[in-house]
Amino acid sequence: MSGAMFGLLSSFDHNLQSWETYKCRISQWFVANDISRTSDPAGIKRRAILLSALTDATYKLAADLAVPKTLTDVPYEDILRLLDDHFTPKRCGFGERYKFYVAVQQEDETYPQWAARLRGLTGHCGFANVEEALRDRFVMGMLPGPEREKLFAQDLTALSLAKAVEMAESVRSARVGATTAAVQVATHDQLFKMTQSTAAGRSGALRLKDGGNKVQCQVCGYRNHDTSQCRFAKLKCKKCNVTGHLRRMCKKINYLEANVVDDGDDDGIPYTL
């Protein structure tokens, strides 16, 4: 074995980690670094690596389990058995199956995640047909919705767990896509209506500003009547003394802009609108 070590071997804290999982990891670390019964027949190196990877609290627990022997005198395989007996609970067949049968999909759990969690629960159930049990619980434990309804309508003889997961994902994707499309269409319609409303409002404002597109009276300048109906038609202009228009409409005054009425200069004549 070379001096270089492959992989990262983390420490083990029984308060935070699973012993069963850690035991699998350290065994694979030994394989990656060519540490085996052949290269380490007495298990001295494996024992040293395992014990050095234990946290203080876990090391003390292992030492207590080894009493009356000293932990460093206990063979590697015996240390594994001590930790197995302590950390691995005795399994009850019906208890494990109960956990499996009452499992249901969580709100934030995808269908592949739900299937994977179920498979993990079958480890100690002792099912004669694991795939069939998994398929049944996967479908029956799904959250209510079109995905479950779709699977309920399938033929049991032709439906496997893998196919059930694939079908559920397909229905979910189609449903999400349809919902997204509907939201986009609704948003587009709403924006279109808002644009139309804004345009109509602007058009109305322009019409009001223009005085409703009515022609301006050439006598007084107001837009609420025609020139022929103006009652000031016989008055003289105070600017040019010509009859037929008021001062504000006099062509000799060039400070008036087109379509603008100078309400501050009405020749002193009140006009009721």
Image: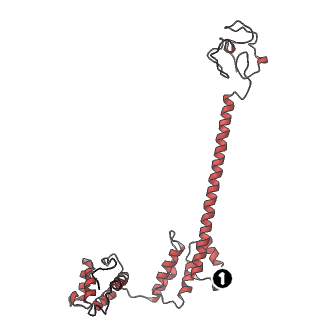
The x, y position of residue 220, in whole percent, is 71, 16
Task: Identify which amino acid the numbered label 1 is placed on.
Answer: Asp
Q: Is residue 135 left or right of residue 215?
A: left
Image vertical order of residue 208 relative to residue 174, above or below: above
**Splitting the image into 4 quarters, where does residue 240 fall?**
top right
Q: Is residue 143 left or right of residue 8?
A: right
Dot 1: element: loop
Image vertical order of residue 173 relative to residue 202, above or below: below
Judge whether residue 227 can be spotted in this image. Answer: yes
Q: Residue furthest top?
A: 241
Q: Residue furthest front?
A: 2
Residue count near mark 1 (Cα–Cα under 10 Å), binned few <14, some 14–19, many ≥20: few
**Splitting the image into 4 quarters, where does residue 50 fall?**
bottom left
Q: Specify the quadrant that holds the N terminus.
A: bottom left
Judge whether residue 104 can be spotted in this image. Answer: no
Q: How is the image coloured?
A: secondary structure
Residue highlighted by disc 1: 155
The x, y position of residue 10, in whole percent, is 31, 76
Residue at figure coordinates x 66%, y 82% from the top left: 155
Image vertical order of residue 201 relative to residue 261, above or below: below
